[in-house]
Image (cartoon, coloured by chain):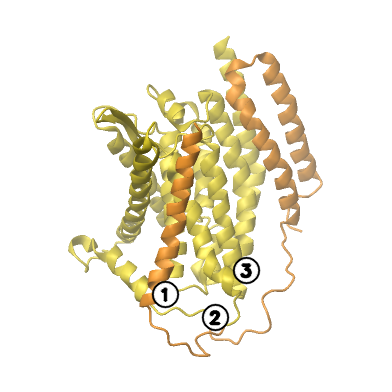
Chain colours: A orange, B yellow
Amino acid sequence: MQDNYGFLGLYLLIAIAFPFVALGVAYLLRPKRPAPVKSSTYECGLETIGETWVQFKAQYYLYALVFVVFDVETVFLYPWAVAYNRLGLFALVEALIFVGILVAGLAYAWRKGALRWM
Amino acid sequence: MDWIDTLLIPAIKAIVVTFGLLLGFAYMTLAERKICARFQLRYGPNQAGPFGIFQPIADALKAIFKEEVVPEHVDKWLYVLCPVLAMVPAILAFAVIPVGRPFVLAGRTITLQLADINVGLLYPMAVAGLGAYGIVLGGWSSNNNYSLLGALRTTAQIISYELPMALSLVALVIVTGTLRMSGIVEYQAALPLIVLQPIGFLIYFICGLAETNRSPFDFPETENELISGYNTEYGGIKFALFFMAEYINMIVVSALVATLFLGGWQGPILPGWLWFFIKTAVMLFVFVWVRASLPRARYDKLMHFCWKFLTPLAVVNLLVTAAVVLILRG
């Protein structure tokens, strides 16, 4: 089984090589005629005012927080699902409690207004 | 296990898969333009060769020979690196998908799958998740208002679709009892899982549309509000790499749907790889069909839809599946 992960490593090398080769070939072949107007920021013909790297309000900030919790909990369900056929009723009840806490958490977040744009 | 098994065969497979994906990408662009054109009562590309079959080659040559402008204001390193960051995970995700029945050649059993790892189902999800970094950082490093908005939308999209997607697959794993791709395909010898998991299939496909930034969830790259969004400042080969990443992601999601829900390479009469190809092609057609049929949604609507409808639905699906499996087992 270790070998199979080795294959993935080999594949990773090829997958990384390809885009770099493409970038390199294009770099060698393409014409280079820079001009100040060409290299200005694109904005529909208007001059850009200021930098774009400003502090920006992401309205889904609370979603992101809730997401982190849920995503980790979902990962915990995978081992349970794989072993499910070998476990008994006890496993189902345990998972029910686990998912119940998850769902209660979602309901709470929903109720408290985390699932709307701030 | 000698060097042929451990090095030569995997290397050949890796190269074949990579070029297969690139070929698939090239002809997917043509197929999409052709099919979209037909939906709109046009012909689509038909000048380069019969039925326009040389169009992808012409496009590739154009991308390579086009002058590229690196705007002054960008974060240079990230700007150049991001197309690669988007492209590598897209290619990598295909590694665990079995494309056909194993066969014997010169006394060796050759599986038509690059790596049959024991966490096969988690792998493409994990790798495809990384692809979003290329888009988010690409949008940010461009230092362009449109690109930044595109990047923000991508983030919103990830935190919406990943949860129902993962939950819908947990239900599938309960049924199959394994994460290994070859095991999942074997399980479907008699009955494709779409019959047992129709709701899981729908949830997964909708999330797949969001994952690949496809219409109706193509918010990060809307042409008419964000001027191509995260790749506004990209041109030439760098744009082509982003474009390739999107299409290869689409192929990967279609192949995953074919493998997980439609029975993979299992099927009567025809050889396995042909069944796999047909199923993947059908799913890709559905992608284009959806694009041609549905208007774009709004990204807060997608968030609400995912969090308030798909996620609870996926949880219910999961619990019902678990209960039914337990009852059937007695």
Q: Quadrant of the C terminus of chain A?
A: bottom right
Check the residue under mark 3 and report the chain it is in. Answer: B
Identity, as a three-letter code, of the amino acid under mark 1: Tyr
Mark 1 element type? helix
Q: Identify the residue under disc 2.
A: B71
Provide residue B279's location: percent of width, then percent of height.
35, 39
Identity, as a three-letter code, of the amino acid under mark 3: Trp
Circle on res. B140: 3
Q: Nearer the viewer, mark 2 or mark 1?
A: 1
Above or below, B292 against B268 in this view is: below
Q: Dot 3: within a 10 Å radius of its alpha carbon, few (fewer than 14), some, or many (20 or more) residues?
A: many
Q: Nearer the viewer, mark 3 or mark 1?
A: 1
Check the residue under mark 2 and report the chain it is in. Answer: B
Provide residue B177's location: percent of width, then percent of height.
54, 23
Q: Residue at x 21, y 61 (%)?
A: B51
Q: Residue at x 50, y 62 (%)?
A: B84
Mark 2 element type? loop
